[in-house]
Image (spheres, rainbow, N blue to C red):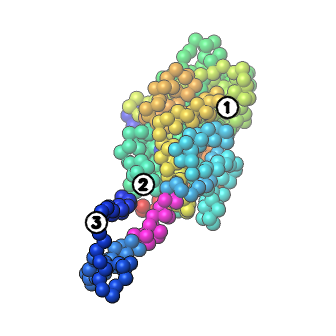
Amino acid sequence: MNGNTIFQTPPESSGQSKPAQNQGAAPSSSPQGSSPFAFRSSRSPISPRGILKVLIVVMLIVSIGYIIYSFGLPLLRRVGITEVTLTYWGLWEEPSTMQSVIAEFNRDHPNIKINYSKQDHKQYRERLVTRIQNGTGPDIFRYHNTWIPMLSDVLAPLPSDVISRDEFGRTFYPVASRDLIKNGAIYGIPLEIDTLALFINKDIFDSAGLSAPKDWIDFINYSRSLTVKDSGGQILTSGAALGAFNNINHAPDIVSMLLVQNGVDLNNIEGNAEEAAEALGFYASFVTAADISTWNTSLDPSMIAFSKGNVAMYFGYSWDYFTIKALNPGLVFEIHPVPQLQGQNATIASYWVEGVSAKSQYQQEALLFLKFLAEKETAQKFFSESSKTRAFGEPYARIDLADSLKDNPIVYPFVSQGSIAVSSFFSSDTHDNGLNSQMNTYLGDAVNAVINGGSPQSAVVTLTEGVNQVKNQYSPPAQP
């Protein structure tokens, strides 16, 4: 058990000069019986050795020509003589944004045409796998950082001339190395990092004279003091949106954060069953703790409630900003790092990655584009172009660009947590209808069991059984 816990409650010319005219000299008499116009060669007959040399030269010329025709021309075609068209599937970025990035790539690679297509997220993962396997899929595609077990048959590893493991580790946050390097091979380039953060209603906090909580003690106290109930005990304003599952946005991610902060290895939950039970019990207590509850299962979905001004604290990702602002442009809120346990700093990362199809006929060209995407200047271009169509671009995946966002109070809280972020297969909004969805179902069952009076210990036992069943359905990535 963690002693600090409070949870118990990615040619030279050969011109022959004219012979000099012998002016004034009498012509010599011609040999008897021969024509004065006959030519007498001064050369000796060609020897057998000379003939052999000529044959050798001819053979060499023929051989070299054959090699060039058979191997050189195809190679030249590959590196740029023939135009190649790549298909690129994305999810969130508008074509106008990506075309600007692609145009930069085409300045150095005019022979590689890239057709970008923004895909519908509904059944995207299934459509992606099916199309790649039947030969009609994209050459480059976007996928979630937790999907490698489901994409092991269709993802191509990146060779070291695209990016080495050392360079990858220096460039991107540790979570990307853990997620995207499998069996020594790198399987994608992240264009963003996103982490679970804390949104606070500025008006509610200012009215109470409070600032953002720094730890879970503050969080608990603020959540209770900021909750307003009517005379019948119904919640009018929630101090904090957590505790339930079905009406809490990102509930899988929030519970994952509590599990990790309490010392649970998500790949071995049964090995930390006691800590997992503590985290589950703590999470559910925001609903079950009777008079001091801050949430219930009948309230609006948490993002809706927060956008209405009815929630003081809400956990979300950077993309939630756009939805909240669309729902209520006048809402004043701030974004901060999540509360921490002493000595257990962690939050959850959920981000998207660009990969190359193992079935692509133009892998070399596709990998060349991924190498371009990994460059610092490309990341800056991507962010600036995205920012033309919305409030901000996707938070930088590159460590060396984080400081450039320090003056951005919206984006910086998400990248500031990149070094402590971990990923979880309990992940919301991936729309995968696969590993994530199945894992989330088992986690939801565990939370609901505790809310309905079951013990957290029993819920953890059932949860680990379900998790192991899902993990067994998916094979690890094939050896490169």
In front: mark 1 or mark 3? 3
> Residue sitting at 56 percent across and 58 percent down?
82
Q: Is residue 403 visible?
A: yes
Total number of numbered labels? Answer: 3
Residue drawn at point x = 50 percent, y = 52 percent: 367
Given residues 235 and 197, the one toward you in this image is: 197
Asked whether the residues under the numbered discs 2 and 1 touch, taking CB atoms below 8 Å apart as contact, a structural biologist would say no
Q: Nearer the viewer, residue 108 or 346?
A: 108
Label 3 sits on a secondary structure element that is: loop
Residue range of the region highlighted in magenta in the rendering: 64-78
Dot 2: few (<14), some (14–19), or many (≥20) neighbours within 10 Å?
Answer: some
Determine the residue positioned at 60% across, 61% down. 132
Q: Quadrant of residue 309?
A: top right
Which is more N-terminal, label 1 or label 2?
A: 2
Residue receiving disc 2: 159
Labels 3, 2: front one? 3
Query: Dot 3 corresponds to which residue?
Result: 25
**Residue 415 image point, x, y percent:** 50, 31
The three-letter amino acid code for the residue at tag 2 is Pro
Q: Main secondary structure of the magenta part?
A: helix
Quadrant position of the C terminus in the picture: bottom left
**Spatial CA span between label 1 and label 3:** 95 Å
Between 92 and 437, the one nearer to me in the picture: 92
Read off the residue under disc 1: 389
Pointer 1: residues within 10 angstroms few (<14), some, or many (20+)? few
Using the rendered view, name the quadrant where residue 313 is placed.
Answer: top right
Percent coordinates x, y for residue 27 in the rendering: 31, 71
Give the percent coordinates (x, y) of residue 73.
49, 64
Asked whether the residues under the numbered discs 3 and 2 touch, taking CB atoms below 8 Å apart as contact, a structural biologist would say: no
